[in-house]
Amino acid sequence: MDKLDLTRLLREHPYPGRGILLGRSADNRKAVVAYFIMGRSENSRNRVFEATEDGIRTRAFDESKMTDPSLIIYHPVRLLPNGLTVVTNGDQTDTIRDAIAQGRCYRHALNTREFEPDAPNYTPRISGVVKPDGSYNLSILKNLDGDPSCCCRYFFEYGSPAAGTGHFIHTYQENAEPLPSFRGEPRRVAADAPDAQALARQLWDSLNGDNKVSLFTQYIDLADGSRETVIINKHG
């Protein structure tokens, strides 16, 4: 199957919502991680990414304008003591972290969670885990074709990533009312940017100018574990 052009996918989709890209660099030496958030409401747009000791968190850009932090303030990325990198679009980052600390896996963690309770959209929870060897997992928890009485959980395992290849998953299939959940498998895309800075610029320039909020990219050296990280915020 041919690899898709992620920048083109983003340019043609004004509101994919929140998105996760995991993959392997073109030189086959680094794991590739990217996460972005978008927003249509003032509350969603009033956010920035901020670096933490173990990853990043979201926070309000203007605290006086924050109306409901419940689904928009969380830690999207955490590096765990065992070398796993967890990236998600909600507080299930911490659910995964806590389960792994107790000797369980990310599947067990996500089997305790469902999509977000934001009717009528019921935004999917998307999650990724990158292992120290560069293999990775992606998952999505979503309602059944708009029926919130049923939560469908899908898990995707990528044990031997190909050089210059990634997989991309996002929350919304299209910009409609209500917002329909992502459908199908994660998109197989090219991940051939030479470094985290170049990837960040490609993705940021491709996201809709009105709706984009914040972007995180990271290249993880598979030999020594060092990390090159880039954060871009629309505010500040």
Image (cartoon, helix red, strand yellow):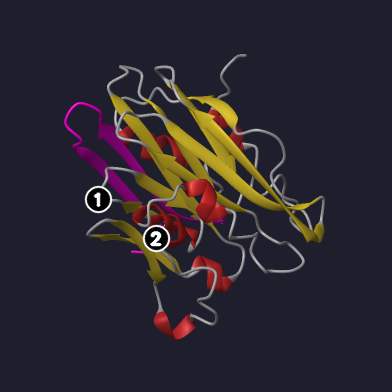
Q: Which residue is mark 2?
A: 98
Question: Where does the magenta region start and end?
Answer: 211-236
The answer to whether residue 224 is magenta is yes
* Pointer 1 local density, CA inside 10 Å: few below 14, some 14–19, many at least 20: few
Q: Is residue 229 above or below residue 75?
A: above
Q: Which residue is mark 1?
A: 81
Placement of the N terminus among the 4 image quadrants: top right
Q: Is residue 129 above or below residue 73?
A: above
Q: Residue 105: image x %, image y %?
A: 45, 47
Main secondary structure found in the magenta portion: strand
Q: Residue at x 34, y 54 (%)?
A: 78
Would residue 23 appear left or right of 179 to someone viewing this image?
Answer: left
Would residue 144 appear left or right of 43 to someone viewing this image?
Answer: right
Residue type at mark 2: give it: Asp
Q: Residue 50: image x %, image y %?
A: 31, 62
For residue 71, which quarter of the picture?
bottom right
Would residue 89 appear left or right of 16 to someone viewing this image?
Answer: left
